[in-house]
Image: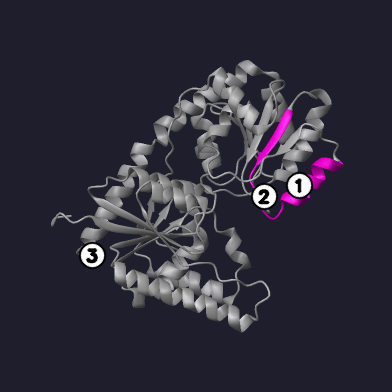
């Protein structure tokens, strides 16, 4: 800032385990402290990631989660309204220069309350394809439309997402900025870290490990991974399948794995930071129907893991078929299994693809580039609004 004051940037978020949330924490840690003051406003209760944000030096305000279970509808909505009032009061008291709201709940609240909160700059993020909005009701569509019009600029994390926003939401391309996710390259995997990661995953030391990291929800494709692995197990009974994450579809996938007779399968549950677990994987698989720019695959590539993934959304910007991994069509269970088996049976190919993925991710999705592009956008928007 020309007056030497730091820009006050606020992220409204839940800070529950997720790729977007991990990216926010990277910014909180690495944005230059002499130029930016980062705060989080939790749209819910305190979480482990929120405590991590505090340890990184960010200010965290929790609005609390309005309880719905057992409450009359009128009482629940009164509690929601109370949280909105608290949010507005907080924004006016803290006088943020920029609200950078990445996900629907955050940018819709920021847009609806903007006339009252008086935040000078609103940045609305798009971290996924917008097909899920087809299920929105009237109120959700109205809030989304208001957020689209109210945002000073929309940030997409991939070319696929930017194109989707233009096509599905009718946004002028001039109002969209692409800032791809960033990732830190960890040290190359060594045997001691590999053993430690496998021990944490509970898979011992024998047999290759296939890792699938992500929230268990519709469209993430964990059921297809189980189907593919059941077929693979016929020829590779030594192979392990490890799921990391939680969500509404987890119980169904666990039941499917039992019904398929998979013995070497583990469900590790949610972890705040899965990055240390990639050392224990010999292969990372993603079978999603739709993706913006999957953080899981960035982290897998950074760790030098060979990847099999569906060609969903921005995934081909990370996984180039035959160069940095293997791509299969969305929904192709047979193709998924064939590609997985190929990399398990051809370790030389797997090693080459993993090495190329690490080089590509480091070159195109580096953390320094992510931080500098975001910082430049914040300062550009602040200047535009006289901050």
Give the residue at mark 2.
216
Q: What element carries label 1?
A: helix
At x 78%, y 39%, the residue is 227
Task: State the residue lying farthest toward the left.
Answer: 3
Q: Label 1 near label 2: C-beta < 8 Å?
A: yes
The image's mark for residue 253 is 1
Q: 10 Å neighbourhood of mark 2: few (<14), some, or many (≥20)?
A: many
For marks 1 and 3, the one nearer the N-term is 1
Task: State the residue lying farthest toward the top.
Answer: 348
Q: Nearer the viewer, residue 327 or 344?
A: 344
* In the image: residue 386, left or right of residue 331: left
Residue 320 visible in the displayed image: no
Q: Which of 79 and 291 is in front in this view?
A: 79
Give the residue at mark 3.
385
For marks 2 and 1, the one nearer the N-term is 2
Residue 234 drawn at (x, y percent): 84, 27
Q: Which residues, given as a range, are shown in magenta? A: 240-259
């Amino acid at each position: 800032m020309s007056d030497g004051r730091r820009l006050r940037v606020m992220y409204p978020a839940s800070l529950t385990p997720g790729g977007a949330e991990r990216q926010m924490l990277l910014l909180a840690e690495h944005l230059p402290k002499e130029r930016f003051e980062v705060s989080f406003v939790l749209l819910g209760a305190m979480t482990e990631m929120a405590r991590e944000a505090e340890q990184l030096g960010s200010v965290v305000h929790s609005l609390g989660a309005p309880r719905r279970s057992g409450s009359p509808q009128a009482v629940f909505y009164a509690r929601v309204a109370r949280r909105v009032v608290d949010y507005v009061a907080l924004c006016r008291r803290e006088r943020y220069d920029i609200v950078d709201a990445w996900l629907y709940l955050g940018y819709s609240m920021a847009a609806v309350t903007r006339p009252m909160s008086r935040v000078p700059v609103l940045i609305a993020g798009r971290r996924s394809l917008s097909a899920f909005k087809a299920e929105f009701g009237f109120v959700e569509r109205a809030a989304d439309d208001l957020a689209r019009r109210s945002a000073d600029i929309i940030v997409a994390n991939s070319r696929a997402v930017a194109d989707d926003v233009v096509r599905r939401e009718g946004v002028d391309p001039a109002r969209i900025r692409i800032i791809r996710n960033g990732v830190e390259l960890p040290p190359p995997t060594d045997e001691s870290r590999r053993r430690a990661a496998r021990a944490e995953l509970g898979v011992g030391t024998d047999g290759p490990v296939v890792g699938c990291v992500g929230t268990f929800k519709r469209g993430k494709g964990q059921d297809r991974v189980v189907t593919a692995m059941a077929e693979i197990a016929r020829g590779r009974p030594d192979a392990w399948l490890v799921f990391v994450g939680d969500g509404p579809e987890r119980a169904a996938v666990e039941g499917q794995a039992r019904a398929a007779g998979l013995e070497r399968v583990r469900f590790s549950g949610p972890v705040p930071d899965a990055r240390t677990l990639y050392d224990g994987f010999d292969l990372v698989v993603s079978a999603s129907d739709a993706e913006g720019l999957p953080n899981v695959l960035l982290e897998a590539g950074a760790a030098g893991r060979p990847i099999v993934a569906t060609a969903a959304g921005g995934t081909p910007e990370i996984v180039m078929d035959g160069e940095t991994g293997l791509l299969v069509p969305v929904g192709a269970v047979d193709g998924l299994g064939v590609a997985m088996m190929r990399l398990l049976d051809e370790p030389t190919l797997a090693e080459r693809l993993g090495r190329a993925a690490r080089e590509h991710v480091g070159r195109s999705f580096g953390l320094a580039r992510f931080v500098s592009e975001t910082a430049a956008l914040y300062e550009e928007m602040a200047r535009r609004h006289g901050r």
